[in-house]
Image: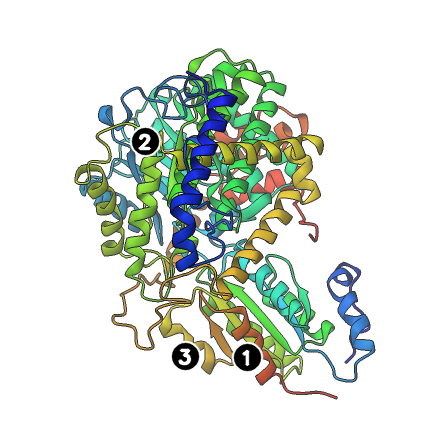
């Protein structure tokens, strides 16, 4: 798996960080920020994308209304360490487990799936059982998300 | 009497005296809590406001009387003494049956107007049985796929008497058509129907992002509804130009004000271009603002909005009808300010935000329920939200006099600052060629994103306090609140009714009507008559949107 085939539309987001990476021995954490379902409220997704980038990570934002299939394909193509799924519409129980299982089907066994948004307490444990690494509720500091990724992304050569 | 430069400098000198003699010794002993005091929009707020800060404001020219130009103090000469604001709680979830029951419950509790929340498939123009609707049917609002759903939604609610606001944008004209056909079946006269269609597509590209078609055809659909309503439904508001979502996406108060009013100007220009008379259609344009946490900033925003609109309509569009100059608006408390942590605190936030709307002279108001950072509201939470308005209206005395904060040095100076900030944005947007062009360039989108990020950082640095989130947190929260869970069976229920409606209808009539919708789109004719015919034939929302998608294609957001 390589990240050579970066789509031109994604270059804007990634080229600066890639140049920096070339001079560093350690691989940067790569994160796909994804917005599945029909909802268009992308304030959270965009704030998180920028905060992760400011923390030195490479971030690819999918844009709106991506199906789980599109998200899993992008995760594979971009060779990411984690997928951050922003969801506010209540469709998390349908969409998140499907994203996890599609990633695993593609062999992305270590790729973390993080969910951020409006998720009722009783759904959180179920999502975790289904393979979601963590659920971040409204009011979470971006530093906590950065910290979680640094601690939980498995180092790669 | 207008202030002169001399009186202004005298007033400035008095302030300086106070600073030297009284303030300085105290500051030397004990510094203030912070170096810089900021509003929730991260704007600096001064220590004190005095006549020196309002020296360039002329009472008659800028403030004036309620019901008189430039309407800073309100559009009604009697304020709320004549009629209170309309208490219009936004509601919608699950099936049309469930939402119909919620409507009747709220009206039974003294609510004075209705407001429909549709689910995401409806907002995006997909039927309940579309694969894209999976997991979303009835979740964020009520599911409506065809006239058959709309008939259930308004069953037993007389549309000639109750004003209904519909929050729907990209497919708004189709939901308007469904509404009119239901009214017609109830025997209501379209000429007597009043209510509001949100129908503000510009703010979708700017902020909420529930679009279907590219911008220019979408603007044409909106303009068609102006024309149709002016002639056939003259008491109906075909648009609610909305700052609410712009603010929720992260805009500052000034950005909300500026982008909303500049959107309003854009709609007026498109209407004029389509041959409509400003004094005929503009009186039916309504507005919709957010009520956020910073009390004075919000009150100033509403007052500035009325003043700017009156001046723009007179100076830019040469309006003569007084109604054209009067900005009417709905207010909703800030959903984005509600916290998951210690959710009962939200009741207090909502009450104070609602009070700002009332001090700003809002014409109608929605108060959020305390559980809305968790899910759609339960009956109990929705009831407390309504009671909050009733307490403000009938217990506090704030509705006894008009514009009670008018004349406050701080508020008047802030109103002027808001106005100046908005006019600066107008200049920038005009220089780009207009709002459609600015949106195509991503200008308002980028401005809002930047503000959202700066606010987040200010919260994380502790410069902006959110009680229960970055201060006064609790490890163990005192009480969990019950939340509304939407049954996953809603979709099956909706698909069943959809299939029944499809079986019963005259298929030839549906195909003909849909072809007429396509023809209207291709030929640039008004699409409303064909849309109404399609709705009458029980063509579904998804089918009518598909007919328009065939002609117009889909909007693709560029990367900003």
Asked if badges 1 and 2 are on one and the same chain, I answer no
How many residues crowd around disc 1 within 10 Å: few (fewer than 14), some, or many (20 or more)? Answer: some
Host chain of mark 2: B
Q: CA distance from mark 1 to mark 2?
A: 49 Å
How many residues crowd around disc 3 within 10 Å: few (fewer than 14), some, or many (20 or more)? Answer: some
According to the picture, the residue beneath numbered tag 3 turns out to be A125
Q: Which mark is residue B142?
A: none
Q: Position of residue A34 (x, y in %)?
A: 60, 65
In the image shown, does B22 or B234 lie closer to the viewer?
B22
Q: Position of residue B206 (x, y in %)?
A: 59, 44
**Residue at point 49%, 46% (across, down):** B247
- Name which quarter of the figure residue A68 lies in: bottom right
In the image shown, does B274 or B80 lie closer to the viewer?
B80
SS state under label 2:
loop
Assign the N terminus of chain B to one quadrant of the image. Answer: top left
Q: CA distance from mark 3 to mark 1?
A: 18 Å
Q: CA distance from mark 2 to mark 3?
A: 43 Å
According to the picture, the residue beneath numbered tag 2 turns out to be B163
SS state under label 1:
helix
Seen in the picture, residue B174 relative to B451 is either above or below; the reply is above
**Residue at point 30%, 26% (across, down):** B160
SS state under label 3:
helix
Q: Is residue B525 left or right of residue A14?
A: left
Whether residues under marks 3 and 1 lie with C-beta atoms below 8 angstroms apart, the answer is no
According to the picture, the residue beneath numbered tag 1 turns out to be A148
């Amino acid at each position: 798996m390589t990240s050579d085939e970066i789509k031109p539309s994604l270059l804007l987001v990634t080229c600066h960080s890639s140049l920096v990476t070339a001079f560093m021995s350690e691989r940067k954490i790569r994160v796909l920020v994804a917005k599945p379902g029909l909802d268009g409220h992308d304030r959270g997704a965009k704030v998180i994308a920028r905060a992760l980038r400011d923390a030195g990570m490479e971030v690819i934002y999918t844009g709106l209304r991506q199906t789980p299939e599109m998200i899993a394909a992008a995760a594979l193509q971009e060779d990411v360490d984690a997928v951050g799924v922003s969801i506010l519409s209540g469709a998390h129980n349908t969409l998140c487990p499907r994203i996890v299982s599609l990633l695993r089907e593609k062999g992305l066994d270590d790729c973390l799936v993080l969910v951020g948004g409006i998720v009722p307490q009783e759904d959180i444990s179920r999502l975790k059982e289904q393979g979601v690494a963590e659920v971040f509720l409204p009011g979470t500091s971006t530093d906590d998300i950065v910290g979680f990724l640094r601690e939980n992304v498995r180092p790669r050569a | 009497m207008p202030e002169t430069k001399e009186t202004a400098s005298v007033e400035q000198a008095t302030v300086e005296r106070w600073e030297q003699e009284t303030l300085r010794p105290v500051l030397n002993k004990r510094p203030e809590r912070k170096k810089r005091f900021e509003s929730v929009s991260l704007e600096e707020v001064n220590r004190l406001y005095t006549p020196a800060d309002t020296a360039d404001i002329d009472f008659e020219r800028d403030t004036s009387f309620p019901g008189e130009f430039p309407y800073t103090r309100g559009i009604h000469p009697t304020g709320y003494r004549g009629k209170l604001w309309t208490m219009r709680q936004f509601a919608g979830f699950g099936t049309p049956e469930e939402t119909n029951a919620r409507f009747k419950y709220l009206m039974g509790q003294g609510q004075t107007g209705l407001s429909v929340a549709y689910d995401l498939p409806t907002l995006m123009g997909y039927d309940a049985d579309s694969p894209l609707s999976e997991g979303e049917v009835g979740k964020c609002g009520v599911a409506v796929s065809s006239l058959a759903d709309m008939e259930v939604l308004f069953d037993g609610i007389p549309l000639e008497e109750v004003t209904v606001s519909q929050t729907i944008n990209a497919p708004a004209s189709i939901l308007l058509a469904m509404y009119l056909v239901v009214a017609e079946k109830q025997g209501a006269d379209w000429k007597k129907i009043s209510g509001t269609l949100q129908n503000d597509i510009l703010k979708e590209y700017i902020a909420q992002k529930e679009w279907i078609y590219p911008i220019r055809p979408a603007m044409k659909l909106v303009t068609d509804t102006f024309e149709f309503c002016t002639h056939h439904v003259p008491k109906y508001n075909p648009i609610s130009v909305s700052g609410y979502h712009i603010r929720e996406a992260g805009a500052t108060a000034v950005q909300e004000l500026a982008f909303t009013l500049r959107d309003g100007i854009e709609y007026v220009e498109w209407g004029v271009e389509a041959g409509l008379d400003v004094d005929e259609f503009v009186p039916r344009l309504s507005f919709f603002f957010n009520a956020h946490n910073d009390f004075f900033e919000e009150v100033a925003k509403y007052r500035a909005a009325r003043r700017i609109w009156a001046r723009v309509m007179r100076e830019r569009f040469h309006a003569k009808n007084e109604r054209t100059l009067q900005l009417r608006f709905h207010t909703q408390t800030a959903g984005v300010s509600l916290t998951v942590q210690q959710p009962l605190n939200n009741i207090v936030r909502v009450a104070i935000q609602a009070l700002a709307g009332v001090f700003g002279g809002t014409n109608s108001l929605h108060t959020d329920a305390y559980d809305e950072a968790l899910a759609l509201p339960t009956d109990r939470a929705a009831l407390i939200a309504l009671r909050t308005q009733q307490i403000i209206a009938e217990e506090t005395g704030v509705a006894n006099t008009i514009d009670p904060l008018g004349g406050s040095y701080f508020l008047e100076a802030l109103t002027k600052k808001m106005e100046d900030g908005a006019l600066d944005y107008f200049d920038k947007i005009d220089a780009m060629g207009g709002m459609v062009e600015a949106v195509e360039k991503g200008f308002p989108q980028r401005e809002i994103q930047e503000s959202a990020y700066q606010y987040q950082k200010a919260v994380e640095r502790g410069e902006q306090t959110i009680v229960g989130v970055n201060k006064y947190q609790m490890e163990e929260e005192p009480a969990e609140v019950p939340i509304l869970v939407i049954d996953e069976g809603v979709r099956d229920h909706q698909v069943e009714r959809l299939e029944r409606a499809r079986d019963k209808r005259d298929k030839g009539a549906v195909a003909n009507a849909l072809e007429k919708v396509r023809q209207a789109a291709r030929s640039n004719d008004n699409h409303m008559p064909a849309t109404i015919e399609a709705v009458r034939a029980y063509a579904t929302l998804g089918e009518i949107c598909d007919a328009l998608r065939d002609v117009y294609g889909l909007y693709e957001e560029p990367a900003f």
